[in-house]
């Protein structure tokens, strides 16, 4: 029988979730996603130290922010030599509540890709799914700059992204699972909360069904997986972005993978758009999403700071 990875590719576009472009080729993903933590991890490996040093040296007179963007795009350019589709490159998480700065950074990243000969259709700009981030993405999409809204944990974030007509969202399966498991403590039943009953899986399935039922064009890409069961439970999702470790597990296994998600047969009119006040209240009512969004921004900001320090040390 074909591997689970090959079976999954029949239903879902498989995306590599890594900055390690030398490792991803073996899995033949269509797209790839990066974030500050993944790039930081990659540049600390001996294989990638020359890439960082060369990029910093080539832009000695530039500001730190500009050099960081050159490093991110350099990784993206190498990734695009491996994948036939798109790469996601993330705007600094420290700009998550600053719409104008997010817009400026996104435009600069796209400009760097285009200066290197890459069509903007092959790039997704990753932005945290805060209200400010979603509104920045709304403007960027009108300019033909496609966006991947990340750190997405709640249904209201998905609703607002659909309202903004963004290209793609990345709901975080594993971090939702982590929160509910920690919250339950000793009463957590792993078997009862596995597969399609996993709280992270259920969140993505609800969003997917809502989008398809209302004809919302935004792509759904499940992200942040903790185990293979979460991945196979979402077979049929538009895309799934998967770490190399889990891609290897899927490649090594051959048990059957069945389609779990499928488009709706009947399309309903889209619901009314969320106002800013409604969005903020709904997010506030969701303790898990509120906590995980804030934590995710903090963690990415810390890693962005560490990347800054590595670059500063070489300037």
Image (tube, rainbow, N blue to C red):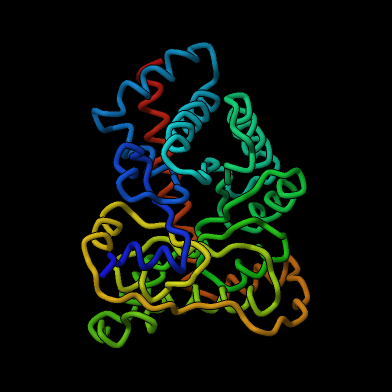
Residue 287 pos. (x, y %): 49, 73
Q: Residue furthest front?
A: 1
Q: Quadrant of residue 104?
A: top right
Q: Vertically, is 167 above or below 261?
A: above
38 vs 154, left or right, is left
Q: Nearer the viewer, residue 5 or 172?
A: 5
Residue at 23% x, 83% y is 186
- Residue 228 shows up from this direction: yes
Closest to the observer, 26 or 297: 26
Determine whether 276 is above or below 132 in the image.
below
Task: Name the quadrant containing residue 284.
Answer: bottom right
Q: How many marks?
A: 0
Q: x and y percent of residue 144 in the render?
A: 72, 44
Res 276 → quadrant: bottom right
Residue displayed at 62% across by 71% down: 156
Instruction: Give 186 or 29, whichever is nearer the viewer.
Output: 29
Locate the C terminus by quadrant. top left
Q: Residue at x 45, y 43 (%)?
A: 83
Residue 158's x, y, as percent?
Answer: 61, 68
Q: Nearer the viewer, residue 296 or 18?
A: 18
Whether residue 93 is visible to the viewer of this picture, yes or no, is no
At 43% across and 73% down in the image, what residue appears?
A: 234
Q: Where does the image place residue 267, in percent across and percent down from the top left?
A: 71, 81
Q: In the rendered image of this protein, does residue 147 appear above or below residue 59?
A: below
- For the N terminus, the quadrant is bottom left
271 relative position to 120: left or right: right
């Amino acid at each position: 029988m074909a591997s689970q990875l090959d079976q999954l590719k029949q239903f879902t576009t498989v995306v590599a979730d890594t900055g390690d472009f030398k490792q991803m080729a073996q899995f033949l993903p269509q797209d790839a996603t990066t974030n500050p933590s993944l790039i930081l991890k990659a540049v600390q490996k001996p294989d990638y130290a020359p890439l960082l040093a060369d990029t910093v040296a080539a832009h000695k007179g530039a500001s730190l922010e500009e050099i960081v963007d050159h490093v991110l795009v350099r990784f993206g350019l190498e990734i695009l030599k491996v994948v036939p589709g798109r790469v996601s490159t993330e705007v600094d998480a420290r700009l998550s509540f600053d719409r104008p700065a997010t817009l400026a950074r996104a435009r600069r990243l796209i400009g760097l890709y285009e200066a290197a000969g890459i069509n903007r259709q092959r790039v997704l700009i990753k932005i945290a799914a805060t209200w400010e981030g979603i509104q920045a993405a709304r403007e960027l999409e009108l300019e033909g700059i496609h966006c991947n809204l990340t750190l997405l944990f709640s249904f209201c974030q998905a609703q607002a992204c659909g309202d903004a007509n963004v290209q793609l969202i990345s709901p975080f399966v594993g971090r939702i699972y982590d929160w509910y498991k920690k919250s339950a403590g000793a009463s957590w039943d792993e078997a009862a909360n596995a597969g399609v009953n996993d709280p992270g899986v259920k969140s993505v399935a609800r969003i997917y069904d809502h989008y398809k039922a209302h004809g919302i064009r935004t792509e759904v890409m499940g992200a942040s997986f903790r185990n293979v069961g979460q991945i196979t439970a979402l077979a049929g999702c538009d895309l799934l972005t998967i770490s190399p470790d889990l891609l290897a597990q899927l490649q090594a296994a051959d048990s059957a993978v069945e389609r779990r998600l499928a488009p709706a047969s009947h399309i309903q009119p889209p619901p009314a758009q969320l106002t800013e006040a409604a969005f903020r209240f709904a997010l506030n009512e969701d303790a898990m999403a509120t906590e995980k969004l804030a934590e995710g921004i903090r963690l990415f900001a810390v890693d962005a700071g560490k990347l800054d320090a590595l670059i500063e040390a070489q300037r």
